[in-house]
Image (cartoon, rainbow, N blue to C red):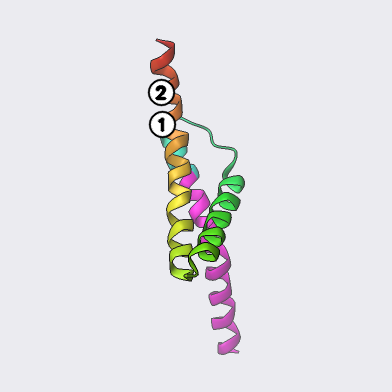
Amino acid sequence: MFDTLILMLDSTIRVATPLIFAALAGLFCERSGVVNIGLEGNLLASAFAGAATASVTGSAWEGVAAGVFWFPLQCHCCMVSPLLLTVVIR
């Protein structure tokens, strides 16, 4: 009984981690004043970046690093582009 509970908690944390990261990215985009409705696309793009990097370099750790750093980079572009658009319009 106790083993089943531990396995269930383990799988819950493991499966919920990408959703928690997406929620945090949405929070940062909201705080910057941008409504980001493409968070699922950002998740797919960062997964692709990680897989492509791991395939090219042959290192799983470099693939993980690329996937981890690609997602905030996309959200940063999401936050900066409206500011640049505001500067250009003025």
Q: Which SS does the magenta portion mostly show?
A: helix
Q: What element carries label 2?
A: helix
- Horizontal and vertical percent position of residue 19: 55, 56
Q: What stretch is highlighted in magenta?
A: 1-25
Q: In which quarter of the image is residue 90?
A: top left
Q: Where does label 1 land, which residue?
A: 80
- Horizontal and vertical percent position of residue 48: 58, 55
Give the number of the disc on residue 58. Answer: none
Q: Does the magenta stretch include residue 20?
A: yes
Q: Mark 1–mark 2 contact, CB under 8 Å?
A: yes
Type of amino acid under label 1: Val
Tell me: 84 left or right of 23.
left
Residue that appears at 57% across and 51% down: 43
Is 87 rendered above or below residue 51?
Answer: above
In depth, the one of 9 and 79 nearer the eye is 79
Which quarter of the rendered picture does the N terminus lie within? bottom right
Distance of label 1 from label 2 (alpha carbons): 6 Å
Is 21 rendered above or below residue 37?
Answer: below
Crowding near pointer 2: few (<14 within 10 Å), some, many (20+)?
few
